[in-house]
C-alpha cells in the first residue's frame, strides 16, 4: 500500500492509514502522505520547465553548440562562412569571437575562452539562429580545424599516470588507515580478496540541461534547468562581471538532475553569452547526444576489496582500494572507498583512492557518488565472505555492526542497520531461503535471492527562508529551494504548516528563484533538512511574533526570517548516517543469459519520514536506478575516438517499465527512527540511499541463482551467458 510505513518489531508501528483517520484536532501536516502540490500542473502541462513555451518572446533566438571531434589538441581555425550563409543564422561564436568572460572556478565553464580541446565533445563553437532547426543546421555547417594530439582515455589498474590525491569528492581524505590491515588480513583464518569493476555511467534526466537567457540592459535573467539557482547565479555574476543584483536565475520546475545539474553547466554560460552577443533572448536545450560529454558522468571505478575474518565471521581486516579516472582540467575523485569506513567494526582498516588523469570529460556527481559504486564492491565482497564462512549474509552483517563509528570513533546519532536487515528479512521471507547456490531451477530459469546493506551520510547546508502571515489567513513561505522532482515543494509546505500549527492548504510556497531568500542546491540528499530547518525556524519565529502581536496585521502582512548559518554550521559530536537494507530476487535465464528482477525490497532507517508518499517514491526511484546500474547501464570509452560510445537512450539502457517489478514486488519500508541530533524535523536525507545497496543485492542474488560470481557491472546477457 503506497506510503505505508512499517516499523521494526521493537518500535511502534505507524502507518499512513492510521494517520488519515479524521482527527478531533487539525491533522499534523508533517508526516502526512500529502500529494505533490504541483502534481496537477505537471500532468496537465501547466508546469513550465526552463525552455518551455511560456518563456518564449516573439524575438527569441535559438543556439546549438558544436562539439570537438578530437579528444586532445587545439582548435587552429573555425570557418564560419558556410554557417553564416545559411538562412536564419544570426551569429557563430568561436574561441576567437566569443565575448571574454571572467575566470570560473570550474574550468569546464571557460567555454569558447581558449583554443585547447581537453576532451572529445568539448564545445568549440556556438551557432545562434532564428529557429531551432536553423541553429542545428548552422552548427552542422561550422568547419573546425584542429591540431590533434595523441590521447589516452583508457583506465587501467596499473596506469603509470595514477596518483593518490589529497582528497576525494566530498572533502574526504583519499587515504585512511587504522591498525595494520595487511598484516591482519594475512593472519586471518578466512579471506576474501576480490576485484570489482564498474563502467562509466551517465545521468540522463528526462529534461535535458536547458536554459533561456535574456538581457535587459545590464540585467541578466536566466531560466535554467538546475538543481540550484544559487550556484548558477554566482557563476554567471562572476563570468559576466555583474553585481549580484544584476542577475536573476529561475529554476522553477526541473525534470530530474541526479547530480548532473548540481553544478552550473556550459549550456547556461553559452546561452547568456549568445543573448548578450546577439541582443536577443536565447534558448539553448542540449541535445541528448551531447550530455555524456558535457554534464559530468560517474567515473569508472576499479575496486580491490580484501576482507579478513575469524571463523565466526568477526571481521579483523577491511581494505578497500579504488582506482578511478579524472579529467586533465579538473580533479574529481569518486569517493568509492569512503563508505567502507563506517560500515563495519574491524580493528584494522585501509581505504584508499587513486586517480588517473585522462583525456576524458570531467566526471562529477551521479546519485550517491562514492556510495553507489563503493557499496557494490564492499557488499559483494561481504556476500563472498558469507559464502566462504558458511554464514548467512544477514547474520554476517549483524555480527559486524559497530557500536560507534569505526572511522571517527564518534557515537552514531542513530544507527538502525540491524533493524533494517531484520525487518527486511522478515518482510522478504528470508528465513525460508536455501543458502545453497544454483538449486532453484524451473526449466531454463534459475532463481536466487540476495541482500546488501546501504548507507548515506547526513549532509546539511546553511539556508535562509522567510514566512509572511497574510490578511486572508494564509501564510507565504519563500525560500530558493529547488524541486527536481522529489516533492521538495510539498514537504517544505508541510514543514511550514506543522511549525505554524495550521492546515497544509493555508500555506503558499514560493521556491526556485534567486529573488527569494538564499538557499543551497538540491544535492547530497540534504535539501529537505537544509531548507526545512530555515523554514521551520522562520515559522517558529513568526508564531512567536504573532502571539505577541496586538491589533490588525500591517498592510504587507507580518514577516519573519531565519538564517541557519550558525546551527547548520556546527560540527556535531556524532557520526550521522542513514542506513538501509536491500533484498532482491532474480531469475536468470540459462538459455539467453537474461537477468530479471522479480522482487526488490528496501528497508531504511533515515530519521523521521516527513511525507511517506513522496519518500516512498524517492526510495523506489533510487532502487530503480540501482537496478539499471546492476543490469543495463553501461558506457564504453572508445579508445580510438576518445569518446563515450553511447550517445542516446537506445544505446545507453536505463530500465524501462518492463524491466522493473510492480508494487508490491518492488517496495520501500522504513523503521521509525527518532534522532534528536539532526534538525528540528528529525529527518535524514532519502534521495540517494535507494540506489546504494541495490546493485550488490541484485549481483548477490545472481550469484545465489547461478553459483557464478560476476564482478563486473552491468550483468548483461553477454556476460552472464
Ligand atoms: Mo546528488 S549526486 O547529491 O545531486
Image (cartoon, rainbow, N blue to C red):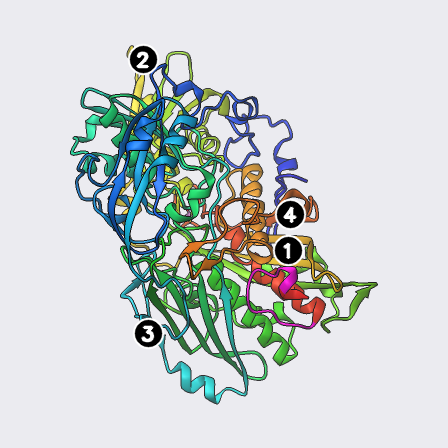
Closer to the N terminus: mark 2 or mark 1?
1
CA–CA distance between discs 2 and 1?
50 Å
Magenta residues, start to end? 707-718
Q: Disc 1 vs disc 4: which is toward the camera?
A: 4
Looking at the rendered image, the disc whose residue lies closer to the viewer, 1 or 3, is 3
* Disc 3 target residue: 160
User: Which dot, 3 or 2, sits closer to the camera?
Assistant: 3
Question: Which of disc 2 and disc 3 is earlier in sequence?
Answer: 3
The crowding category of the residue bearing disc 1, from other C-alpha atoms within 10 Å (few below 14, some 14 to 19, many at least 20), is: few
At 37% from the left and 80% from the top, the residue drawn is: 179
Of 8 and 339, nearer the camera is 339
Please state which of residues 714 and 700 is positioned toward the viewer in this rendering. 714
Specify the quadrant that holds the N terminus. Answer: top right
User: Residue 9's mark?
Assistant: 1
Is the CB of mark 4 within 8 Å of ligand 1?
no
Query: On the image, numbered disc 2 is attached to which residue?
Result: 553
Q: Position of residue 110 (x, y in %)?
A: 24, 44
Question: Is residue 544 visible in the rendered structure shown here?
Answer: no
- Categorize mark 3 by other alpha carbons within 10 Å: few (<14), some (14-19), many (20+): few
Residue 376 x %, y %: 52, 63
Amino acid at each position: 500500500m503506497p506510503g505505508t510505513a512499517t516499523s521494526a518489531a521493537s518500535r511502534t508501528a505507524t502507518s499512513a492509514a492510521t494517520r488519515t483517520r479524521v482527527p478531533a484536532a487539525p491533522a499534523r501536516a508533517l508526516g502526512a502522505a500529502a500529494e505533490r502540490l504541483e502534481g496537477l500542473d505537471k500532468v496537465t502541462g501547466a508546469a513550465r520547465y526552463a525552455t518551455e513555451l511560456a518563456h518564449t518572446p516573439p524575438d527569441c533566438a535559438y543556439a546549438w553548440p558544436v562539439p570537438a571531434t578530437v579528444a586532445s589538441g587545439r582548435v587552429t581555425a573555425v570557418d564560419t562562412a558556410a554557417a553564416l550563409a545559411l538562412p536564419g543564422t544570426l551569429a557563430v561564436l568561436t574561441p576567437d569571437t566569443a565575448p571574454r568572460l571572467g575566470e570560473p572556478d570550474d574550468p569546464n565553464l571557460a567555454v569558447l575562452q581558449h583554443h585547447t580541446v581537453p576532451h572529445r565533445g568539448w564545445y568549440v563553437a556556438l551557432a545562434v539562429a532564428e529557429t531551432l532547426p536553423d541553429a542545428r543546421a548552422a552548427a552542422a555547417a561550422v568547419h573546425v580545424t584542429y591540431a590533434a594530439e595523441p590521447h589516452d582515455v583508457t583506465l587501467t589498474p596499473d596506469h603509470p599516470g595514477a596518483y593518490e590525491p589529497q582528497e576525494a569528492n566530498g572533502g574526504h581524505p583519499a587515504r585512511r588507515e587504522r591498525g595494520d590491515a595487511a598484516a591482519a588480513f594475512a593472519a586471518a583464518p578466512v579471506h576474501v580478496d576480490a576485484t570489482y569493476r564498474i563502467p562509466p555511467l551517465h545521468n540522463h534526466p528526462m529534461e535535458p540541461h536547458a536554459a533561456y537567457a535574456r538581457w535587459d540592459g545590464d540585467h541578466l535573467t536566466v531560466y535554467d534547468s538546475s538543481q540550484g539557482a544559487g550556484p548558477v547565479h554566482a557563476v554567471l555574476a562572476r563570468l559576466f562581471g555583474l553585481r549580484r543584483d544584476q542577475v536573476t536565475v529561475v529554476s522553477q520546475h526541473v525534470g530530474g538532475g541526479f547530480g548532473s545539474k548540481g553544478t552550473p553547466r556550459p549550456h547556461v554560460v553559452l546561452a547568456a553569452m549568445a543573448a548578450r552577443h546577439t541582443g536577443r533572448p536565447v534558448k539553448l536545450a542540449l541535445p541528448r547526444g551531447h550530455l555524456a560529454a558535457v554534464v559530468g558522468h560517474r567515473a569508472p571505478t576499479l575496486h580491490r576489496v580484501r576482507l579478513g575474518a575469524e571463523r565466526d565471521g568477526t571481521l579483523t581486516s577491511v581494505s578497500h582500494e579504488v582506482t578511478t579516472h579524472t579529467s586533465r582540467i579538473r580533479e574529481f575523485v569518486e569517493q568509492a572507498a569512503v563508505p567502507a569506513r563506517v560500515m563495519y567494526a574491524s580493528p584494522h582498516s585501509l581505504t584508499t583512492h587513486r586517480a588517473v588523469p585522462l583525456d576524458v570529460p570531467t566526471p562529477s556527481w551521479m546519485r550517491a557518488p562514492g556510495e553507489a559504486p563503493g557499496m557494490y564492491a564492499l557488499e559483494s565482497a561481504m556476500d563472498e565472505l558469507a559464502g566462504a564462512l558458511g554464514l548467512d549474509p544477514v547474520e554476517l552483517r549483524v555480527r559486524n555492526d559497530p557500536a560507534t563509528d569505526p572511522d571517527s570513533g564518534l557515537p552514531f546519532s542513530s544507527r538502525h542497520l540491524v533493524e533494517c536487515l531484520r525487518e527486511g528479512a522478515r518482510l522478504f521471507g528470508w528465513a525460508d531461503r536455501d543458502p545453497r547456490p544454483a538449486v532453484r531451477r524451473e526449466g531454463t530459469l534459475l532463481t536466487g535471492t540476495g541482500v546488501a546493506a546501504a548507507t548515506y551520510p547526513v549532509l546539511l547546508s546553511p539556508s535562509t527562508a522567510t514566512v509572511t502571515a497574510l490578511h486572508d489567513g494564509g501564510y507565504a513561505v519563500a525560500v530558493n529551494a529547488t524541486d527536481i522532482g522529489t516533492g521538495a515543494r510539498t514537504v517544505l509546505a508541510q514543514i511550514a504548516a506543522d511549525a505554524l500549527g495550521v492546515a497544509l492548504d493555508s500555506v503558499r510556497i514560493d521556491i526556485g528563484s534567486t529573488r527569494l531568500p538564499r538557499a543551497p542546491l538540491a544535492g547530497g540528499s540534504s535539501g529537505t533538512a537544509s531548507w526545512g530547518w530555515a523554514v521551520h525556524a522562520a515559522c517558529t519565529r513568526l508564531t512567536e511574533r504573532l502571539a505577541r502581536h496586538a491589533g490588525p496585521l500591517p498592510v504587507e502582512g507580518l514577516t519573519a526570517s531565519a538564517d541557519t548559518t550558525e546551527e547548520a554550521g556546527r560540527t556535531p559530536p556524532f557520526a550521522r548516517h542513514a542506513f538501509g537494507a536491500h533484498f532482491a530476487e532474480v531469475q536468470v535465464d540459462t538459455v539467453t543469459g537474461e537477468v530479471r528482477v522479480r522482487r526488490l525490497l528496501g528497508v531504511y532507517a533515515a530519521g523521521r519520514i516527513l511525507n511517506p508518499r513522496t519518500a516512498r517514491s524517492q526510495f523506489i526511484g533510487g532502487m530503480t536506478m540501482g537496478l539499471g546500474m546492476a543490469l543495463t547501464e553501461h558506457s564504453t570509452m572508445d579508445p580510438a575516438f576518445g569518446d563515450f560510445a553511447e550517445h542516446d537512450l537506445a544505446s545507453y539502457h536505463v530500465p524501462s517499465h518492463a524491466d522493473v517489478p510492480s508494487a508490491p514486488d518492488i517496495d520501500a519500508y522504513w523503521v521509525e527512527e527518532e534522532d534528536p541530533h539532526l534538525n528540528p524535523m528529525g529527518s535524514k536525507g532519502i534521495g540517494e540511499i535507494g540506489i546504494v545497496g541495490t546493485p550488490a543485492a541484485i549481483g548477490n542474488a545472481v550469484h545465489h541463482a547461478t553459483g557464478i560470481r560476476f564482478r563486473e557491472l552491468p550483468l548483461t546477457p553477454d556476460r552472464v551467458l
